[in-house]
Image (tube, helix red, strand yellow):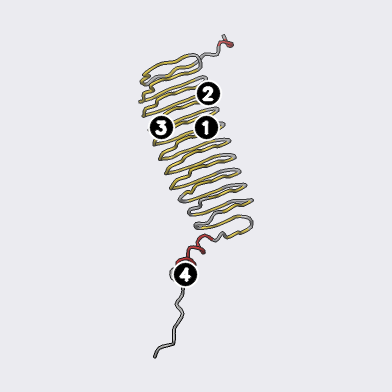
Amino acid sequence: MRGLHVKRKPKYAKEFAIVALLCLPLNINGNVFTVLGNASSSNNIYSIFSLYQKADQDAFSLLGGIYQEAGYDATTFLGFEVYQKAGHDNVLVIGLSGYQKAENKNLLGIGISVFQNSKKESGSIMGLIGYQKSNDIALALCCFVGKQDSGQQSGLAMGLIGYQNSKKYSSTVFSMALYQRAGGKDSAFAMWSSIKDEDKSEK
């Protein structure tokens, strides 16, 4: 018989509902938990993947996102962060970072970092670093680095660096710096080299 029509559910309605559920933030005592959602919290944020995270305390993402900001620590375990800012430490264990800015320390475990900027220490264990800047210490291990710039000490072990600069002490171990500078002293094509700028006021 004709004339009876059963209304079909909209196509992909189930899929959209699942995605919406995964993006839904869950707030527990000011701490936000989400799988894929963007979040802002006066306490902590924990997610699998969030394009946007902003927390007054800690922000944690398993697979990264685009923007991560924390009043204390910002941490991504595996993935990428285009922009990562922390009032204390930034940590990217494995992955890709565009810009890391920290009041205390920046740390990249294994991966690529375009720009690391910290007031105290910037460090990388293994990977490719474009520009590593610190008011205190900049260190890299098993890395290719474009430029290191530090207020106190710049160091590279097992790798290659284009321009290494510090106000007091620059060193390479099992490494080469195309140009190395510490205060008023400099060296070109420095292989396993350490130079220290002596404070003339102490003499």
Q: Amino acid at mark 3?
A: Leu
Q: Identify the element where label 1 is drawn.
A: strand
Q: Disc 3 marks which residue? A: 141
| Residue in the foreground of this view, choosing between 154 and 40 | 40
Q: What is the spatial separation of the Cα atoms under label 1 and label 4, in whole angstroms? A: 49 Å
Q: Quadrant of the C terminus?
A: top right
Which numbered disc flags the more N-terminal residue, 2 or 1? 1
Q: What is the spatial separation of the Cα atoms under label 2 and label 4, in whole angstroms? A: 58 Å
Instruction: Place residue 175 in its image quadrant.
Output: top left
Task: Determine whether label 1 and label 4 are within 8 Å by CB.
Answer: no
Task: Determine whether label 3 and label 1 are within 8 Å by CB.
Answer: no
Q: Neighbour class for label 2 at 10 Å: few (<14), some, many (≥20)?
A: many
Q: Residue at x 50, y 58 (%)?
A: 35
Which numbered disc flags the more N-terminal residue, 2 or 4? 4
Task: Determine whether label 2 and label 3 are within 8 Å by CB.
Answer: no
What is the number of the mark on residue 13? Answer: 4
What is the number of the mark on residue 121? Answer: 1
Q: Neighbour class for label 1 at 10 Å: few (<14), some, many (≥20)?
A: many
Q: What is the spatial separation of the Cα atoms under label 3 and label 1, in whole angstroms? A: 14 Å
